[in-house]
Amino acid sequence: MTNKSHRHGACSGRFAGTWYAIWETSVNGHRNINTETVLMKNRGTVTYLRNVSPSADNQLAGYLWKGQARLHHKQFLVGDYAASEQSRLYRGTLFYVVHPSGQFMYGRWVGCNYDRPLASGLSVFARSATLAEEKFIELSNSHRPRDGQGKLQLDEE
């Protein structure tokens, strides 16, 4: 018999509260970085997520969404999300590595977006907007070509 608390890890409010998210996506074939405020709450082993409003960084394709995830092995938050409006087909999966401090998590979403039926991007959730930006830049730069091109700086266009 499998011990569920060992397999999933104990949530018990660990993620409850306000988080700041940064997502890498695309609109009309161009890379777009979305920022959002996300509320999380825990019920048992499930963490429920929802954004407060569509991303102001994505006026054309931003939307309200909600999701759910479970903590596995006290380190991986794995789940799915879908647009809150049934008329929007946006949905997908979430995979995050939770930092031991509990102050941020980083990972990737895979799903459909405005441009494509199969898309993915890097993402960070953090307890502060500043920390989210810092960790997103680190994550993005560590996942770019080794030739040094394509380094991300959010304040440059």
Image: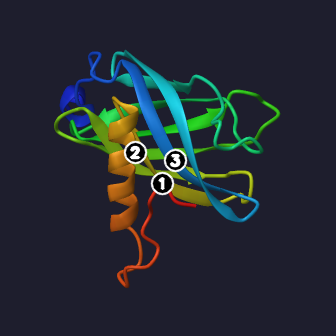
> x and y percent of residue 124 in the render?
40, 44
Q: Is residue 113 visible?
A: yes
Residue matched to label 3: 23
- Numbered label attached to residue 133: 2
Q: CA distance from mark 2 to mark 3?
A: 10 Å
Place of residue 43 in the rendered image (x, y in percent of width and height, measured from the top left): 39, 14
Say which residue label 1 marks.
154
Label whose residue precedes the other's in the sequence (3 or 1) = 3
SS class, disc 1: loop
Q: Quadrant of the C terminus?
A: bottom right
The amino acid sitting under disc 1 is Leu
84 or 38: nearer the viewer: 38
Which quadrant of the figure has residue 100?
A: top left
Specify which label sits upstream in the sequence, 2 or 1: 2
Residue at (70% x, 34% y) in the render: 63
Amino acid type at mark 3: Trp
Few, some or many residues within 10 Å of mark 1 (<14, 14–19, 20+) = few
